[in-house]
């Protein structure tokens, strides 16, 4: 090959290089998944899913931690979604772009960058000790809600801004009010984007350990009230692995975590596709 | 009879004055065309007539616009009712990504008209008015975005008609359409003017000459001349109008 390369040669080389990079990243991801599943799948069984842990998790299954995870996430989403979407609507539709919106946006961006362990500490100080909720589902879900709030605000805001201005104009020109326009035109069009933010947050919450262990504790019982302490799957995994209780159960938990995150994503794609077909 | 009377209307975007002291009387059930070079304020003017400029934060409107004798810029005016009475069709066909039926019924819903009989009646009537009913009556649940551009623009017109306006504002309604579709929309406008007062902005001078009864020429935010189309195109009073219509502008 002679220097300088012809555009055609350059093109061929770049293409090869990009292909290689893509293959590499896919390989790394696939390797991680393969590794976890290889060690985890043999542990999985129906028993593993529906039995409670015994002897600190050395024996038995992970049922109570599945329940803990689900309850915590549902509560966190129930708190954070209306709050976040409402904030996003206010910022994009109800206030002119200005100093106020910039400050709020900057604040929420900063919040997004804070390590989760700081949220854990904050939740511990405020909810667990100051407000005396103790290590509980309530403290844990409030903390998680604060943690995912910036993501929901940001993605909702982007989704709302992405809705063509023409739709709003038509609605107003027909005599629609602001709220009718927002609720009937803007939000339905922005829903796939908003849903993406919510899913991202589910992913982040499922995997969250630091913020949860400080606020929801790590009790292995099945929780019976908002004030019960609970243990999520990722906290369970962390404790099993770190304290050397049972590596095989840890891998089993990891496999369940992985599979649930994958299923959440696949399910969302399915829902979104159906929605998109209906709405556009 | 006069439908719209504009008195000393000026519009500012921040410190930029987009319209300068406009005075105009628009006749009921006639087509009035507004022509003029790009950026001269035609859209701005049109959007004053249904107060769509209220939506633009930096826009400031000074002056009076009377519709049937009522100044629409007065405090007590019901803005939503005003916009119901003054319908608008935009430059690009912009149906909602919903079914044909839901598009038409949107305006009824925002005005809380939910009697199924009235809804059905308006649906048929407005689709008939834009001559879409025969083609589409069996596919009302189809997504509006699957229609051709011309059909979409007709649908948008029908959507505006569904709330029973008296005035129709059209901002270059044919600019996204081919000549044949344009001709058909123009024919439709002749039909519509039997019932509606129409104000149309157009870049296309032949179109203004073909469809309109009155024509106004805007230049740099001023209304240079407004009068009967025939007179404007054959014996314009102002030299600047003459330059524009004979293509000597610029
Ligand atoms: N939202 C806005 N903010 C600031 N200036 C604006 C805004 N909208 C329009 N203008 C300015 O006002 C002037 C008139 O604009 P307008 O859109 O009314 O012109 P037009 O005659 O409709 O032009 P066109 O034929 O290109 O559609 C232009 O100079 C434009 O740049
Ligand atoms: Mg314009």
Image (cartoon, coloured by chain):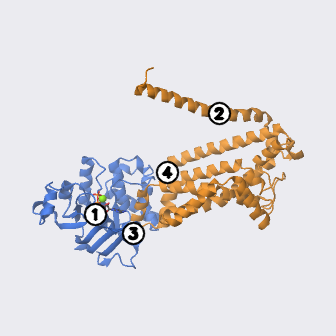
Chain colours: A orange, B blue
Label 1 near ligand 1 (CB < 8 Å): yes
- The answer for how far apart the CA atoms under marks 4 and 3 are is 29 Å
- The answer for how far apart the CA atoms under marks 3 and 2 are is 55 Å
Q: Nearer the viewer, mark 3 or mark 2?
A: 2
Q: What is the secondary structure assignment of the residue under circle 1? A: loop
Point out the residue furthest to the right here: A55
Residue topped by disc 2: A28
Residue at point 56%, 55% (across, down): A154
- The answer for how far apart the CA atoms under marks 2 and 1 are is 58 Å
Evaluate whether label 2 is on the same chain as label 1.
no
Residue topped by disc 4: A279
- The answer for how far apart the CA atoms under marks 1 and 4 are is 35 Å
The chain that hosts pointer 2 is A
Evaluate whether label 4 is on the same chain as label 2.
yes
Q: In the image, residue B47 lies at what x, y percent?
A: 33, 65
Kindly indicate the quadrant of the structure image that contains residue B188: bottom left
- The answer for how far apart the CA atoms under marks 1 and 3 are is 16 Å
Q: What is the secondary structure assignment of the residue under circle 4? A: helix
Residue topped by disc 1: B41
Label 3 near ligand 1 (CB < 8 Å): no
Evaluate whether label 3 is on the same chain as label 2.
no
């Amino acid at each position: 090959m002679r220097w300088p390369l012809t555009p055609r040669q350059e093109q061929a080389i770049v293409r090869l290089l990009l292909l290689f990079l893509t293959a590499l990243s896919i390989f790394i991801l696939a390797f991680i998944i393969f590794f976890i599943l290889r060690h985890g799948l043999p542990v999985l069984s129906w028993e593993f899913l529906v039995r409670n842990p015994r002897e600190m998790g050395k024996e038995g299954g992970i049922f109570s931690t599945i329940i803990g995870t689900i309850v915590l996430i549902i509560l966190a989403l129930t708190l954070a979604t209306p709050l976040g979407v409402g904030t996003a609507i206010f910022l994009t539709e109800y206030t002119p772009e200005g100093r106020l919106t910039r400050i709020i946006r900057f604040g929420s961006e900063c919040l997004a960058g804070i390590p989760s362990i700081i949220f854990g500490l904050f939740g511990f100080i405020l909810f667990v000790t100051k407000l005396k909720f103790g290590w509980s589902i309530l403290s844990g879900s409030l903390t998680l809600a604060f943690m995912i709030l910036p993501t929901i605000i940001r993605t909702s805001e982007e989704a709302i801004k992405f809705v063509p201005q023409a739709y709003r104009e038509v609605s107003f020109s027909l005599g629609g009010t602001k709220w009718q326009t927002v609720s009937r035109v803007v939000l339905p069009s922005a829903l796939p984007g908003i849903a993406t933010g919510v899913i991202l947050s589910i992913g982040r919450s499922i995997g969250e350990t630091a913020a949860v262990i400080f606020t929801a504790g790590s009790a292995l019982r099945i929780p019976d009230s908002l004030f019960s302490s609970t243990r999520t799957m990722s906290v369970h995994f962390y404790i099993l692995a770190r304290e050397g209780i049972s590596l095989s159960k840890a891998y089993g938990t990891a496999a369940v975590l992985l599979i649930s995150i994958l299923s959440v994503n696949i399910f969302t794609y399915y829902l979104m596709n159906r929605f998109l077909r209906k709405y556009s | 009879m006069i439908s719209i009377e504009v008195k000393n209307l000026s519009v500012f975007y921040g410190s930029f004055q987009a319209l300068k002291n406009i005075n105009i009387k628009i006749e009921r059930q006639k087509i009035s065309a507004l022509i003029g070079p790009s950026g001269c304020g035609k859209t701005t003017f049109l959007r004053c007539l249904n107060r769509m400029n209220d939506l633009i934060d930096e826009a400031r409107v000074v002056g009076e616009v009377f519709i049937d004798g009522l100044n629409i810029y007065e405090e007590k005016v019901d803005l939503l009712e005003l916009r119901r009475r003054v319908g608008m069709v935009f430059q690009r066909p912009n149906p909602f990504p919903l079914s044909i039926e839901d598009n038409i019924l949107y305006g009824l819903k925002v005005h809380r008209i939910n009697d199924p009989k009235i809804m059905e009646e308006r649906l048929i009537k407005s689709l008939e008015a834009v001559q879409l009913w025969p083609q589409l009556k069996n596919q009302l649940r189809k997504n509006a975005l699957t229609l051709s551009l011309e059909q979409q623009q007709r649908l948008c017109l029908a959507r505006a008609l569904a709330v029973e306006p008296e005035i129709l504002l059209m901002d270059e309604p044919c600019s996204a359409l081919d000549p044949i579709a344009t001709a058909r929309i123009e024919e439709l406008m002749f039909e519509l003017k039997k019932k509606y007062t129409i104000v149309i902005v157009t870049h296309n001078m032949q179109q203004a000459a073909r469809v309109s009864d009155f024509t106004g020429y805007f230049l740099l935010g001023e209304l240079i001349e407004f009068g009967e189309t025939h007179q404007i195109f054959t014996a314009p009073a102002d030299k600047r109008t003459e330059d524009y219509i004979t293509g000597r502008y610029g």
